[in-house]
Image: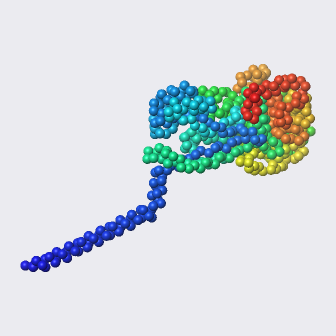
Amino acid sequence: MRRPGQDNAESHRRLSRRALLLGGAQIVFMSMLGLRMRYLQVDQADQFRLLAEENRINIRLLPPARGEIFDRNGVPIAVNEPSYRITMVREDAGDVEQVISQLSSLVDLDEVTLNRARAEMKRSAPFLPVTLADHISWEEMSRIAVNAPSLPGITPEVGLSRQYPIRGDFAHVVGYVGPVSDYDLSKIEDPDQLLRIPRFQIGKVGVESKLEDNLRGKAGAKRVEVNSVGRVMRELDRREGQQGADLQLTLDQSLQSYIQARLGEESAAAVVIDCQNGDILSLNSSPSFDPNLFVTGISVADYRDLTENNYRPLAAKSVQGTYPPGSTFKMVTALAALEEGIITPEDTVWCPGHLEVSNRRFHCWKRAGHGHVDLEEALRESCDVYFYDVALKLGIDKLSAVADRLGLGHKFDLPLSGIARGLNPTREWKERVRGQAWVVGDTVNASIGQGNVLASPLQLAVMTARLASGKDITPRLVKSVDGIETPHPEAQSLGFNANNLQKIRRAMFTVSNHRRGTAYGSRIIEDAYRMAGKTGTSQVRNITAAERARGVTKNEDLPWERRDHALFVNFAPYDNPRIAVAVVVEHGGGGSTAAAPIARDITLQALHGGMPPLDAYPTKDRKRIEEQQKRLRAVIPDRDGNRGGDRA
């Protein structure tokens, strides 16, 4: 039996060991806890401070001002204007419907917009503002501001919105902007966060769309302090965005507006291009539309009016429309034959009114024929048989090669929507696309710009500018970006024989200056402005043998959509070409009667820099032209967009 003293000592040792182990464990735990606290509070202090700030401070994007667009002389054609809107904060308003009723007595509120706002209020936080009306007038804005004490939760706000002061005259070129849609976002791989701002606007078509990255600018930002539920308490600081780049186009507003007025309600297109550097001076499609309708969202009724119009006002016919060039293509055939030495200017062809090719009769527009004609006479009087005969000797390969050098079949690099390539047909094209071999009849049709040949008004203007200059003129639309000139390579020689080009130009001169020329009725009599041109009439229907036997039905006796297209191309002045013009009037009938008079007026307007003097016109036309000019002055807008009686 152990002694009590020994037992006590043993128990004391055991307790001491346990206390030591427990104390050691506590020390280790406290040390680890201390190290962890130091790590969190010292080493990771910046990280947690940032997380705390992110919970308290929000960074919100500020949309930049969109770049503006000007014509070559600095006239604004797409600008930013103050836009006034009304917003409501639901929790401040109290009785929402009562406040809306009071507001309705002051301004007209759109019911569709109100219903959209009500739905947005239900799904958003009560302290977030919701737009009740947008693009209100300054007078309405003032009435709301005066009555603000009786309109709880209502705030009038001001922002920027796109405006097109000259309305439809530039609609097909500049295009328009509109709110970002889901479809817009789906086309962008990594969309800018700006695009997710409610009601943010981007370019939809035309220059506004193609140069969106230049025009949009860079977002600004503001830091705001928010509470735990996201309510903004105060703004801490702000950094404004970078405005988008301003664009200057090569277009001339006064010429563009004149041509739009001159085309009137015709379904037509016109292009004017500088023969020396390729600057596009005007690019018109008619009828047009008001792009301002699209900025905030066009109504169903307005959109239906545009889409159901047979004249297709939404189509940019000058670059998107392609037409058989008809007789305006005959210069291509003639130049190709001269270059190959197949003909000389003095060689003649007998035209009895038709030509038999492979058991098929190809007709001339003049049923009785032209008799013996040489190159100049064939172009001047537009004899089809002459060019049929030449094309049979030339072949499609050499013909299409010259057409290519003159710009036909080219898709020019311009910031526009839906630019058409047209069609300069070849053997390879027909085999690949149609699965058929090229036949001699195809060449005959192509020689007068019919069959498979298609060209846009822009391509016809380029073709004419190249014939006038002998250089590879390339069209340019953007003159400068933020004041920096857009580079444009100097035009080089096309390599055509100068004498051959001069023969073509001389023949074009007789078209509008010789009594037997097809455009003699649309001549310019002032020597400094005399033009060289070519009429064209392209068929849109087949004429049967039975119809020819009884007499071809006149265009005016046919439904509008079955009438021939009317075309005219020209350059001027003849001795020193400055501009080239192309006009197409859809289903206008004859080029000499429908397109040539318009082209003459455009040419004089462009060269004179304004309404031309009456003595530039033949005496018999002056009274009619004087009345026409009075009508046009009443509708042509000035640089501020004011038209006729709207001007101060």
Q: From the viewer's perspective, tell me whether residue 508 is left or right of residue 34.
A: right
Question: How many dots with numbers?
Answer: 0
Whether 46 is drawn above or below 85: the answer is below
Determine which quarter of the picture holds residue 108. top right
* x 50%, y 35%: residue: 153
Image quarter where the C terminus lies is top right
The image shows residue 204 at horizontal and vertical percentages of: 63, 39
- Looking at the rendering, which quadrant does residue 460 occupy? top right
Q: Is residue 51 left or right of residue 280?
A: left
Q: Is residue 111 visible?
A: no
**Near-viewer residue (552 or 623):** 623
Residue 425 locus on image (x, y percent): 73, 41
Q: Nearer the viewer, residue 399 or 380?
A: 380
Q: Is residue 24 above or below residue 218?
A: below
Q: Position of residue 221 (x, y in %)?
A: 57, 49
Q: Quadrant of the N terminus?
A: bottom left
Snapshot quadrant of residue 380: top right
Q: Measuring 50% from the left and 26% from the top, which residue is drawn there?
A: 101
Q: As rendered, which of 224 and 320 lies closer to the eye?
A: 224
Q: Position of residue 311 (x, y in %)?
A: 69, 28
User: Residue lying farthest left?
Assistant: 1
Image point 32% across, 67% down: which residue? 29
Q: How is the image coloured?
A: rainbow
Most foreground residue, 47 or 341 = 47
- Specify whether residue 506 is in view: yes
At a point 60% along the width and 26% down the height, the residue shown is 301
